[in-house]
Amino acid sequence: MSGPLRTSEKVVKPTPPELMEDAGTGLDYGTRPDRMPGYITPIDRFFLRSHAPTPHLDAASWSLRIEGSGVREPLTYTYADLWERFPLVTVVRTLECAGNRRVLFGEAYGREFKGTQWGRGAIGTAEWTGVRLRDLLEPVGITPGAREVMPQALDAIQTRRPMPLTKALADDTVLALTMNGETLPLDHGYPARVVVSGWLGAASIKWVGRIEVSEHPLYVPWNTEDYVLIGPDYPAQAPSLGVPITAIPVAGLVELPWPALLRPVPQVVRGRAYAGENRVTAVEYRIDEGPWQEATLTPPEIQGAWVRWQFGWDPEPGDHTIQVRATDDQGRTQPDTVPWNDLGYCYHAVLSHPVRVEPTA
């Protein structure tokens, strides 16, 4: 029987505990890893990460302004312009918050991080349809000296984050208008949001109302103070306090509760693995520190999106640990440990997933 319907004044869609994990801010909700039914994450359980309450925007009065020192002719597009004047493209891409697994990072080091208290659920995959960002930029006349492109949100704090021009012009950098075949939901960026493939979720700005193209580096709180790796292993790149995060590192996810309770019968253990801009090529698993074995990858296998994996297990009663490690097409494999960083970002170490198998009564 489902629990009470949970909603927040800061977001629009219901966030019931049987589907979503409350990160405690009223803005941020992760997907329960044991509630991922198919390859595509349904909208009702796609994770939410926002820096301010969801704005209620009207597409009829909304517009998108493209301007800055890197354009010859600033332009303003209406919502109708996006649908009528440009080819639509569809991409299937995974978004992951750079703070995913922050709680587990803290537990590994015996301390608690500030910031959104994410478990493993700040990740999801959707089908996004919209206009390539480069198609919107072409009519404004990009100058030879243009270096960076920065989408800016129409939320209360004007969330924004720059990217290199080359990333903005990539085939799969899209201003999305729909999500999983439906008009973009309010919480996920309606009327339009950017989808920046393979990068941290904070780069995929929601509720976009302005895009700045600049001939100079752009510095904002989201690439100087936040969403940067700060610590002894990450020399500061002034004016940033550390190393700004771009692509997400490779990591795996087991589709079981934490901790998991299983029956002592033959079963299939399933999960996902994601490698940011790259493609996952292998997933290995081991039980109770035993030998590493190869899991089976199941299609589709899409660059910039997660892949599903599975293996069979006939568990004995008692306490067990499942470990999973993924490898991408650049030969990068999940490490056993990750260097400390002050804000608890990009934790992609191999996790020891606790499992209890109880005898059948």
Image: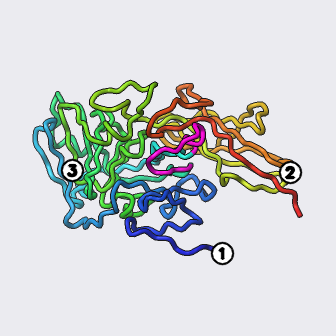
Residue 5: x and y in percent read: 52, 74
> Which of the marked residues, 2 or 1, is nearer the chain's N terminus?
1
Locate residue 76 relative to residue 34 in the image: left or right. left
Q: Which residue in the structure is indicated by mark 3?
A: 210
**Circle 3 SS class:** strand
> Which of the marked residues, 3 or 2, is nearer the chain's N terminus?
3
| Camera-side residue of 342 and 57 | 342
Q: Which residue in the structure is indicated by mark 1?
A: 1
Placement of 284 over or under 61, stated as above or below: above
> Which of the marked residues, 1 or 3, is nearer the chain's N terminus?
1
Crowdedness near tag 1: few (<14), some (14–19) or many (≥20) residues, C-alpha within 10 Å: few
Residue pictured at 61% horizontal, 59% vertical: 35
Tell me the distance, in whole angstroms, between the alpha carbons under discs 2 and 1. Answer: 28 Å
* Kind of residue sitting beneath label 1: Met
Residue 356: x and y in percent read: 78, 51
* Kind of residue sitting beneath label 3: Arg
Which stretch appears magenta? 104-119
Can residue 8 be seen here? The reply is yes
Please count the marks in the image.
3
Crowdedness near tag 2: few (<14), some (14–19) or many (≥20) residues, C-alpha within 10 Å: some
Q: Magenta stretch: residue 105 in it?
A: yes
Of badges 1 and 3, the one in the foreground is 1
Mark identifier at residue 317: 2
Q: Magenta stretch: residue 212 in it?
A: no
